[in-house]
Amino acid sequence: MKKVLALILALCMVSCLVACGGGSSETPKDDSGKQDTTPATPDEGKQDDAETPADETPADEGAETVATPHMNEDGSRNLDMIGYYDLDFDYASGPSYKIAYVAQSATVLYQQTAAAVETWAPRFNMQWLGFSSAENDNDMFMTQVQVLLDQGVDILLLDPDTTIYPAVAGLLADYPEVQWMGNMGIPRDGTTGDGVPNGGQLLKNFAGKDYYGAGVLCGQKLYDWLNETYPDAARSEVGIILMNYSTSPQLVERYQGCYDKVLELMGEENVFPVDLVSYGLGVQAGIDGASPVISTNDNIKYWLVFGLVDDPAQGAASVISTAGLTDTSCCIAIGGAGLQTQCDAGQYDSFRFAYFTSYFMSVEPMMGAMYAFKRGFCTEDEIWPSWVKKNDHGGEGRTLSTLYIPAIWIGQNDYFQFLEWVDLYSGGNYYNYDAEVTLDMYDPYPDVPDGWLDS
């Protein structure tokens, strides 16, 4: 059904282009100033869905206007949308850029990111060089980046251990022609001081979640599950494991949000913070972190676990299964790729929910942004101007932005429709579930959340 729909839409576009001489149509600006966020079909383009942005200065009369993705009616650039794919823009009119993805490991979330980059690459006129895993070795990560630089890579999407971002930035400073962005971890310079964000100043623009807010939602989810499923559970018999990774600022934000919400809703009794720094972030880390807590608290009948990311949540769920407490326990994470993968394989345990953003949605604006930088359409300090935080924009003189990527809750049996929609939206066929979807089911273009610019 999805392929047939795509074919029909493509044929319609060809007919429209022939009839219009290949020109693109534009919708006048909404006088209310409110962005129309109804998703467009791939053949309608996306400029109709965005507010007329940030750079509204018309081109000088008589001056040649350089075509960019998502131009406004007056010929100015739509800097809030320029990173999103625009079907009406001819990406092949410019150079083809070589892109690669390097990550600290090859677990499922990194594999899905690689698949997303590979899917979007040809649409942005990019050559996919492939995915490299550093096997949790920071020296190997730096070596792999250097190898790609030596091979002439143009664009890099990176997922290192966030503590080595300053070293990564130092290496890439010698290659100013190469554009790079961080994917899951916020690239920060490691500096400290009054008014400096946790982890340091931004090194690059970033597209991701509100990590503290996501942690708060996870604390609420654990509380809701317990009260809906076991409303009569004695609080003294409920144990809560909250996993942290104290050397990663954005992982600390997730933990802190969940910790604060849990204490607000359930108090401090039987709350067990677990720092995974000495264990890592894999499935075994979850096992090693949860085992001593669960084995030494045999009075607990109900376990609530915030696993931070998928792999430790999976590990904790396996410990709970061994203890025979799967039915009375709930593990959650911020992620979702691991939950989806294990449920596809028929594995159902106490890992029940994930706060999920598909990487097919998050890599799109980052790839489009780096394409725009390479083409000279805008700079790092110009893109996504509606998303520049007041106290976290790269330090004095910089206006780096932090784009929020929409996320949803998924459970063990309700993710099929959303992921099939992601396939339709991205033009891929990665998930390929048997679900009927249309593009208006979900909104890929976020509004600025309340408090986001002050966070």
Image (tube, rainbow, N blue to C red):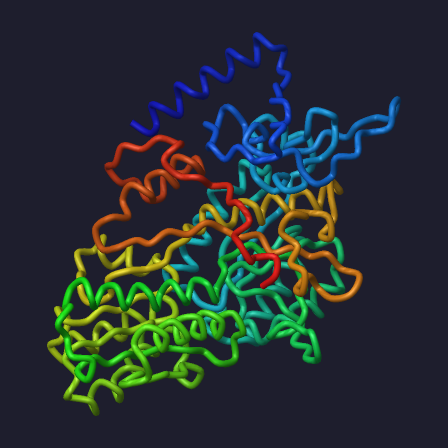
Q: In the image, residue 209 lies at what x, y percent?
A: 49, 58
Kindly indicate the quadrant of the structure image that contains residue 228. Answer: bottom left
Q: In the image, residue 141 lies at what x, y percent?
A: 55, 70
Give the position of the C terminus as an image quadrant: bottom right
Return the residue nearer the eye: 273 or 238.
Answer: 238
Q: Residue furthest top?
A: 19
Q: Residue at x 26, y 87 (%)?
A: 293
Return the residue nearer the eye: 165 or 243.
Answer: 243
Q: How many marks?
A: 0
Side of 53 where 447 appears, left or right: left
Kindly indicate the quadrant of the structure image that contains residue 412. Answer: bottom left
Q: Residue furthest bottom?
A: 296
Side of 285 where 373 appears, left or right: right
The answer to whether one can see residue 310 in this image is no
Q: Residue at x 74, y 39 (%)?
A: 55
Give the position of the N terminus as an image quadrant: top left
Q: Is 276 above or below relative to 417?
A: below
